[in-house]
Amino acid sequence: MTLESAGDPACTYEPPTVASGGPLSHALYRVARLHRTVAAKLLRRTGLYPGQELLMMRLWDAPAARQAELIKAMGLDPSTVTKMLQRLESAGHVKRFPDPADRRASLVEATPASCALRTEVAETWTELERHTLKGLDATERAELARLLAKVERNLCTEAAPAPDAAPGAPSPGSGSGPALGSGAGPAC
């Protein structure tokens, strides 16, 4: 798989002058966008849309999770996660059912039928990693991982809810919500 960059404005785009105060932020935006584009191309063979694989990764590593916890952990709009779950349920990858402890809440779990998809997603992410880091040696890869972890910590601090925020109010784009359970999902 190659990204055809010749004539692709996403690959040759100069930052707008208004972004001159944040050239690295603009570069991160462009790289994240391209990463998602390549991920989408690779995910097509699995039948998943970008983001659905991240939701499935959470479910494969946890027992049943409340839908509200998934929404918080994904850092997305509830309607977006609901639509993801509807599509995944229609495809037979997840099952939703009432929480016996609180019938108003829904629990979601990966189905045993999703085990084959788990292998495909793992292979897709390995291929995505190879495309992303092509041309970087082991030292550069380690340094990039170290620097990105530092940037992520900075942004997590900024994304945290304000001290005066209402309890349970979502933090914008947090994406690093609570652990979704103590055990594993289906035995894939």
Image (tube, rainbow, N blue to C red):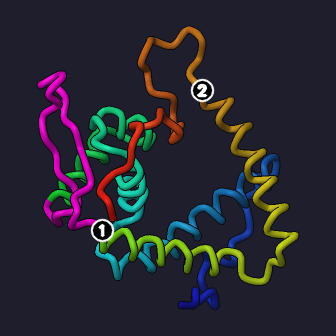
* Residue bearing mark 2: 160
Image coordinates for residue 8, horizontal then vertical, percent = 59, 83
Q: Image quarter for residue 120?
A: bottom left
Q: Is 58 on the left or on the right of 26, as rendered? A: left
| The one of 109 and 71 positioned closer to us in this rendering | 109
Q: Is 38 on the left or on the right of 17, as rendered? A: left
Residue 114 counted in the magenta span: yes
Disc 2 secondary structure class: loop
Residue visible at 32% across and 71% down in the picture: 117
* Residue bearing mark 1: 115
Amino acid residing under circle 2? Ala
| The one of 15 and 92 positioned closer to us in this rendering | 92
Q: Which residues are magenta?
A: 90-115
Give the crowd class for mark 2: few <14, some 14-19, many >=20 residues within 10 Å: some
Cα distance in 3D space between marks 2 and 1: 34 Å
Disc 1 secondary structure class: helix
Amino acid residing under circle 1? Cys
Residue 132's label in the rendered image is none
Q: Earlier in the sequence, mark 2 or mark 1?
A: 1
Q: Image quarter for residue 6?
A: bottom right
Residue visible at 45% across and 12% down in the picture: 166
Residue 142 counted in the magenta span: no
Q: Is 7 on the left or on the right of 62, as rendered? A: right
Q: Is residue 109 above or below residue 107?
A: below
Image coordinates for residue 181, horizontal then vertical, percent = 39, 37
Q: Is 145 on the left or on the right of 64, as rendered? A: right
Give the crowd class for mark 1: few <14, some 14-19, many >=20 residues within 10 Å: some
